[in-house]
């Protein structure tokens, strides 16, 4: 998907006109926490307290620390290498321009997970948001991914999205199982579509979830 930070001239022109007539609700919301009920404290079923808030520029170093502590298997399949400073800079630019909304989960002041939705108003897939959910190894399987997905579904609905797409490789069996539990269905399997961090070609599995008439499957 085209990142707003790397948009070419024609896209800038489109955006200038588009911004004058419609305001991307996420660009507005992302300017500060305090919108859409963030920050918000929740308790996981095991009693752990989690602070959920929208990602901001000041989160950069903690996001890098979180990414660099992820298990090797996760790093292998990262869609963009968020262990790299430049990738996190681009992510933050996308958040600030409203193309991406990211909810960060913190426990005791440390990032333990996040969920993002990315869409592009200038793109013909603008009704579809790409969701990413990443939970740190020590917080998996205790309901945090479900909570984060619920928050990001809500933000997706607010920005008018009709569908969420999650992308992974078929090798990520745990992630596929978790997304199926969240109500996602397989949309497509594309052969040799991506390369992993080691440069090896992998198939790409696209799973999707309709936001219209959203069931309570992922409600927090
Ligand atoms: C996928 C991921 C986000 C799930 O997060 P999580 O916090 O462990 O998920 P939850 O504990 O909220 O579980 C959600 C549901 O999925 C199920 N689930 C979670 N991990 C699972 C696994 N490895 N195998 C089977 N089911 C699993 C849970 O049982 C739960 O279902 P239930 O509520 O009906 O019991 C997490 O494993 C992760 O960060 N993986 C690496 C990143 C990734 O691959 N992301 C996907 C691409 S965007």
Image: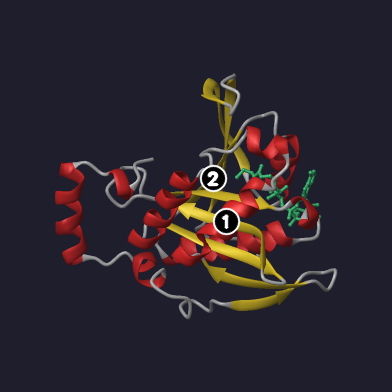
Q: Position of residue 124 (x, y in %)?
A: 31, 42
Mark 1 near ligand 1 (CB under 8 Å)? no
112 on left or right of 63: right
Name the residue located 70 percent from the left edge and 29 percent from the top edge.
Answer: 171
User: How many residues crowd mark 2 within 10 Å: few (<14), some (14–19), many (20+)?
Assistant: many
Q: Earlier in the sequence, mark 2 or mark 1?
A: 1
Mark 2 near ligand 1 (CB under 8 Å)? no
66 on left or right of 58: right
User: How many residues crowd mark 1 within 10 Å: few (<14), some (14–19), many (20+)?
Assistant: many
Name the residue located 45 percent from the left edge and 54 percent from the top edge.
Answer: 162
Task: Relative to 45, say whether 209 is above or below.
Answer: above
User: Which residue lies under the disc numbered 2?
Assistant: 82
Q: Position of residue 176 (x, y in %)?
A: 69, 39
Question: Seen from this angle, which residue lies furthest right?
Answer: 46
Q: Are marks 2 and 1 in contact (CB under 8 Å)?
A: yes
Task: Relative to 191, say whether 102 is above or below.
Answer: below
Does residue 216 appear in this view? no
Name the residue located 70 percent from the left edge and 75 percent from the top edge.
Answer: 42
Q: Quadrant of the C terminus?
A: bottom right
Badge 1 element: helix
Badge 2 element: loop
Q: Position of residue 203 (x, y in %)?
A: 59, 23
User: Which residue lies under the disc numbered 1?
Assistant: 63
């Amino acid at each position: 998907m085209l990142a707003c930070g790397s948009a070419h001239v024609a896209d800038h022109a489109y955006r200038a006109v588009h911004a004058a007539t419609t305001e991307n609700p996420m660009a507005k919301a992302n300017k500060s926490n305090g919108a859409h009920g963030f920050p918000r404290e929740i308790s996981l079923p095991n009693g752990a307290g989690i602070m959920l808030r929208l990602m901001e520029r000041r989160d950069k170093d903690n996001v890098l620390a979180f990414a660099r502590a992820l298990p090797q298997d996760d790093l292998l399949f990262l869609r963009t290498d968020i262990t790299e400073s430049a990738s996190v800079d681009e992510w933050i630019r996308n958040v600030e321009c409203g193309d991406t909304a990211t909810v960060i989960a913190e426990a005791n002041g440390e990032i333990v997970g996040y969920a993002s939705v990315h869409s592009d108003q200038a793109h013909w897939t603008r009704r579809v948001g790409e969701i990413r959910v990443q939970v740190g190894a020590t917080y998996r399987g205790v309901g945090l991914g479900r909570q984060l997905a619920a928050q990001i579904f809500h933000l997706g609905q607010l920005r008018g999205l009709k569908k969420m797409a999650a992308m992974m490789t078929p090798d990520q069996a745990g992630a596929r199982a978790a997304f199926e539990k969240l109500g996602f269905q397989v949309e497509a399997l594309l052969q040799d579509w991506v390369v992993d961090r080691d440069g090896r070609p992998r198939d790409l599995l696209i799973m999707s979830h309709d936001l219209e008439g959203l069931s309570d499957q992922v409600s927090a």
